[in-house]
Image (spheres, grey):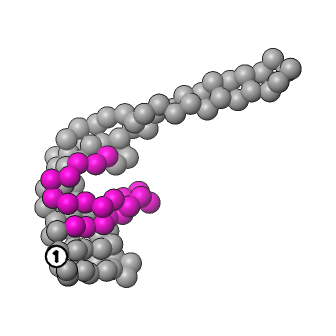
Amino acid sequence: MIAIIEVASKQFKLKEGDTFEIPRTKHKKEISFDKVLLLMSGKDVTIGTPHIKGAKVVCDVIGDTKGEKKIAFKFKKRKSYHRKIGHRDQLTKVKVKDIKTA
């Protein structure tokens, strides 16, 4: 079974056993996502308007990580101005445990 969910304005295509990263959340052992946009089981496809009522994706929390470093470099020629700013997103790594239908 395949599900497409929405988490923090991002969409993820998932199967059971997949791992993915979401923006950092409070520490829990299990998270469930209610905003399921699409469910596909074999040739049966259910599309939500905008979400499927009663559908859920249950996930186990693996741990917290950091994303890759992003660099913003500002520079103005002949003005002796340059700034280097770095940023890393705080993420939570999650593994799909079960996909429940309505």
The quadrant of the rendering that contains the C terminus is bottom left
Q: Position of residue 88 (x, y in %)?
A: 46, 33
Residue numbers of the magenta segment: 2-21
Secondary structure at badge 1 equals loop
Q: Which residue is mark 1?
A: 42
Q: Residue at x 60, y 27 (%)?
A: 85
From this view, report whether residue 84 is shown above or below residue 30: above
Is residue 79 left or right of 89 when viewed as pictured? right
Q: Position of residue 78 (x, y in %)?
A: 86, 20
The quadrant of the rendering that contains the N terminus is bottom left
From this view, report whether residue 11 is shown above or below residue 68: below
Mark 1 is on which residue type? Answer: Gly
Q: Position of residue 82 (x, y in %)?
A: 72, 22
Camera-nearest residue between 6 and 26: 6
From this view, report whether residue 55 is shown above or below residue 66: below
Q: Residue 40: which quarter of the image?
A: bottom left
Majority secondary structure in the magenta region: strand
Label 1 environment density (alpha carbons within 10 Å; few <14, some 14–19, many ≥20): few
Q: Residue at x 38, y 78 (%)?
A: 50
Assess whether residue 48 is covered by the magenta stretch: no
Q: Residue at x 24, y 74 (%)?
A: 39
Assess whether residue 13 is covered by the magenta stretch: yes
Is residue 52 something one can see in this rendering?
Answer: yes
Q: Count up the numbered dots.
A: 1
